[in-house]
Image (tube, coloured by chain):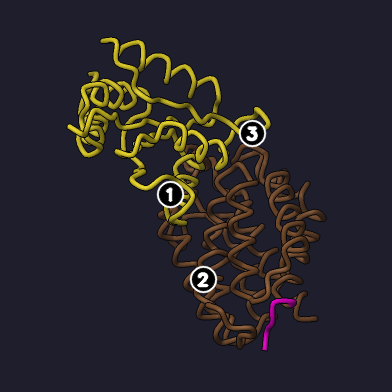
Amino acid sequence: MSDGELVGIVLVSHSAEVAASVAALAKGLAGGGVEVPVAPAGGTEGGGFGTSSELIAAAATSVDRGVGVAVLTDLGSAVLTVKALLAEGDELPAGTRLVDAPFVEGAIAAVVTASTGADLAAVEAAAAEAYTYRKV
Amino acid sequence: MLDADFFRRWMTATAASVDREAERLTALDSPIGDADHGSNLQRGFHAVAAVLEKEAPATPGAVLVLAGRQLISTVGGASGPLYGTLLRRTGKALGDDAEVSEGQFADAFRTGVDAVMALGGAAPGDKTMIDALVPAVDALGDGFGAARAAAEEGALATTPLQARKGRASYLGERSIGHQDPGATSSSLLVAALAEANGE
């Protein structure tokens, strides 16, 4: 537990609609009356498909409550851009971490876990564990 | 010795070269990619040229760090963080010296290329920009002209390869027979080095 503040979640997709919809889905499934700070960072600033470091940095800042930010991504440039921003050192809030997890399932696990007041490591573990859920 | 002006010329020469070749880069990116490589790099290197003119960094390292940051924030595709990391890590490795030798640059550029491999997880032979950059780094000891020739040869040699990284890797054997767009733009970047040096 972490002083009542919740871990922030950033959802980075090549598509603004995908990022926003997954954020809404995860928040909707979390329920429970706790407002987890979740922000989508989808597409480019111009509204196209792609990745925007500005949108990612703004989203991370907006959900940072001082107890860590978990970033989930879809693929390709979304992953590489977050890694490059983390390597820079000062572009994302302290305690921001790229979480290795499937985008939709991981986002739901992360938001539900964050809603319980769990710390960043627990949120990361829950999101990553979503990889182990086999469908067939 | 190479000063900040040399590195600014390198970046503006790259921007001009990407402008000239944008259609070809996008055409190469059509059968095995998402047909945005030329326009993405054009946007990125135009922004680099603009910010270098505006802020006029005083050292070679500062020029490349600023250029790298600008690419990461403006390209919008995977080439942004990849080229951004290449230039930023090269710049950081150059430190604060006002002038650097060609040997210092060769060492720093190798550090940058290693950082790109670590970021993207690509190795030589995966049909990526690495296939032009590694031969270029290996040839830099013989001068910028040798590096340019090695990068061009490396880019051409990606045609028969099957892609193992990036979007093209989903195509499996269908990626064979196409020259890699990233290796091609990397050869333009290396060629611009020779151009900036008046070769």
At label 2, the amino acid type is: Lys
Q: CA distance from mark 3 to mark 2?
A: 28 Å
At label 3, the amino acid type is: Glu
Q: Can marks 3 and 2 be said to lie on one chain?
A: no
Q: CA distance from mark 3 to mark 1?
A: 19 Å
> Which color is chain B depicted in?
brown
> Which color is chain A depicted in?
yellow
Tell me: residue A49, above or below residue A94: above
| Res. B142 image quadrant | bottom right
Q: Residue at x 47, y 50 (%)?
A: A85
Select label 1 or label 2 by which is in front: 2
Tell me the chain of label 3: A
Mark 3 or mark 1, which has the lower sequence index?
3
The residue that mark 1 highlights is A83
Q: CA distance from mark 1 to mark 2?
A: 17 Å
Magenta-colored span: B1-5
Residue closest to the eye, A96 or A64 = A64
**A49 sits to left or right of A98:** right
Q: Residue at x 77, y 66 (%)?
A: B13
Tell me the chain of label 1: A
At label 1, the amino acid type is: Lys
| Res. A97 image quadrant | top left
Q: Secondary structure at mark 1?
A: helix
Residue closest to the eye, B139 or B195 = B195
Tell me, for residue A45, which label it has, or none: 3
The residue that mark 2 highlights is B92
